[in-house]
Amino acid sequence: MWNRNQGRGVRPDESGGRVIDATRHADADPADPWERHVARQDLAALAGAGLRGHPYRPATLRDVPEAAIEDLRPLVGDAHASQLFVLPASHRTTDAAGRGWVTTPTRVLAAAADRVALWVDDGARPGIRADVPYGEVVAIMDLSILLLGRLEIVGERETFVVRYNAVNRPDLRDMLLPLRLSFPRIDFAAGTDTVEPVGLPLKWINVVRSAEVLPAGR
């Protein structure tokens, strides 16, 4: 599969397997179908038109758009608030130079018992824009540059991207824990070589000491 809208996806390789094409750092991040292009000089005027607040994991369903709850119910049932992640309307740049800007409507990401879904308040046509069963998820790519977070769920049939403020990454990762745990566990023999964390590059030290990246459990 190749998702041309996102500019990346999953494609077969010569061995019969699949290659996941992640966005290169220098690539543009094109607009999604529900995003609207806007001139940079008009962003200030939009500040009071729904562009507010950081993404959040709601405390109760009262903190979630009512339309999203109704639309998601056939997929996630009577979801608990902890299974949802609300991303208020925002704006972002689509290229590294900051020349292209788009506004993004309110979105709700849902992680049910067996699937992950994305609801978008797309003007006159709000509704579910992605529905990927856990068994069809090929990869989860969660990248961040400073406070810019970019979550990409790569499925066998569809792929979607959620961009968010990385301050709320712990809440987002915790909500997606059931999806991560749905992947089959691979047992492997431990190597004989040992390296003390102090001798590793900084990023690998962070991985070793992370409470989220463990051989078992979380």
Image (cartoon, grey):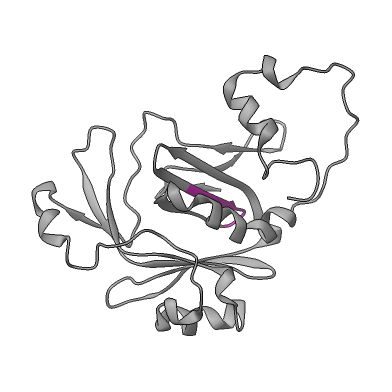
Q: Position of residue 62 (x, y in %)?
A: 45, 82
What residue lies at 21% left-to-right and 43% top-to-bottom? Answer: 100
Q: Nearest the camera: 22 or 87?
A: 87
Please state the extent of the stretch shown in magenta in the rendering. 151-157
Q: Position of residue 178 (x, y in %)?
A: 69, 61
Q: Is residue 38 left or right of residue 114?
A: left
Look at 62% across and 54% down and name the residue there: 156
Residue 149 location (% of width, % of height): 44, 45
Res 105 → quadrant: bottom left
Task: Judge from the rendering whether residue 4 lies leftward or rightward of residue 124; answer left or right.
Answer: right
Q: As drawn, which residue projects farthest toward the front?
A: 198
Q: Is 104 located above or below residue 25 in the figure?
A: below
For image coordinates 74% across by 52% down, the residue present is: 183
**Residue displayed at 23% across by 32% down:** 97
Q: Is residue 153 magenta?
A: yes
Q: Quadrant of residue 125?
A: bottom left
Answer above or below: position of 200 versus 100: above
* Nearest the eye: 200 or 139: 200
51 to 5, vertically: above or below: below
Task: Judge left or right: residue 74 versus residue 126.
Answer: right
* Count of numbered marks: 0
Q: Nearest the camera: 209 or 133?
A: 209
The x and y percentages for residue 72 are: 52, 78
Confirm whether the magenta stretch covers residue 29: no
Q: Quadrant of residue 213?
A: top right
Magenta span: predominant SS is strand
Horizontal side of residue 158 vs 208, given as left or right: left
